[in-house]
């Protein structure tokens, strides 16, 4: 993507960074550097957490499904898409607090519906997190007419899901559409005949790594 409409440090992090910087400076100069040290650590942590670098997909093939999130693959399985009640290939990505947390559309298509579900905050790496945790499902009709669902799932620490798309909007591959603070999971449900291109344990990158290939 040549044009990148978002800052390298995600806007979602600006209040945290400005607040931590001002507090750290005040403590450093008026109280002492050792008192300010934990706040400086939080500032550095926030700086890396809210990074949002531009990415180029590994493939421009129209059949390629690109990862919506940075993280580690924790699920690759044939299952049922619980939001459509149809068979699907499910690929889940777990994001720890050291991953970039911007979410990007894995395919090109039109948003059919956005569904928010309140819930628990168990460890997002656990299978039950997909259906028990707070989550936000975006149902997309891909440009080829097939259905796809991508779900933002809150985690043990994450308590804030942000979604910027809505029904009727057309998303392009790699388009930034959401953010989760701090540590979470993304579930992607694809047509069951799709071929996975990642395996459990793989480290992948939003807007870059090919997750699967559509039939």
Image (cartoon, grey):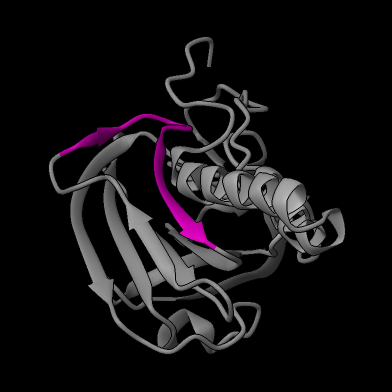
Q: Decide whether the magenta segment is chiefly helix, strand or loop.
A: strand
Residue plotted at (48% across, 79% down): 130
Instruction: Give the residue drawn at x 61%, y 66%.
Output: 183
Q: Position of residue 208 (x, y in %)?
A: 64, 34
* Residue sitting farthest toward the top: 2
**Residue 22 colored magenta?**
no
Residue at figure coordinates x 42%, y 32% from the top left: 175
**Can residue 199 be seen?**
no
Tally of numbered discs: 0
Q: In the rendered view, would you say 34 is above or below 204?
A: below
- Seen from this angle, which residue lies furthest left? 168
Residue 211 drawn at (x, y percent): 62, 47
Looking at the rendering, the stretch of residues picked out in magenta corresponds to 169-181
Q: Height in image: 63 above or below 41?
A: above
Q: Position of residue 59 (x, y in %)?
A: 63, 26
Comparing 106 with 84, the one in front is 106
Residue nearer the viewer, 27 or 201: 27
Quarter holding residue 132: bottom left
Horizontal side of residue 108 vs 72, given as left or right = left
Name the residue located 48 percent from the left edge and 32 percent from the top edge: 174
Residue 64 in view, yes or no: yes
Return the x and y of residue 109 as percentages of the image width and height: 30, 37
Q: Residue furthest right?
A: 34
In-image side of 189 versus 1 (left or right)? left
Q: Is residue 187 left or right of residue 52?
A: left
């Amino acid at each position: 993507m040549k044009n990148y409409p978002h800052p390298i440090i995600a806007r979602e992090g600006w209040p945290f960074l400005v607040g931590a910087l001002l507090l750290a400076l005040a403590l450093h100069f008026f109280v002492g550097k050792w008192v300010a040290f934990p706040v400086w650590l939080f500032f550095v942590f926030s700086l890396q957490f809210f990074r949002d670098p531009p990415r180029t997909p590994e493939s421009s093939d129209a059949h390629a499904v690109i990862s919506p999130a940075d993280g580690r693959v924790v699920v690759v399985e044939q299952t049922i898409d619980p939001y459509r009640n149809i068979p699907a290939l499910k690929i889940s990505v777990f994001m720890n607090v050291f991953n970039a947390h911007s979410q990007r559309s894995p395919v090109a298509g039109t948003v059919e519906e956005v569904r928010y579900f309140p819930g628990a905050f168990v460890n997002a790496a656990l299978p039950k997190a997909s259906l028990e945790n707070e989550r936000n499902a975006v149902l997309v009709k891909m440009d080829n007419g097939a259905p796809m669902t991508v779900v933002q799932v809150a985690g043990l620490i994450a308590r804030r899901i942000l979604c910027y798309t809505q029904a009727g909007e057309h998303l392009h591959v790699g388009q930034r559409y959401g953010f989760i603070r701090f540590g979470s999971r993304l579930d992607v449900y694809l047509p069951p005949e799709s071929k996975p291109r990642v395996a459990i344990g793989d480290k992948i990158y939003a807007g870059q790594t090919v997750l699967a290939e559509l039939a």
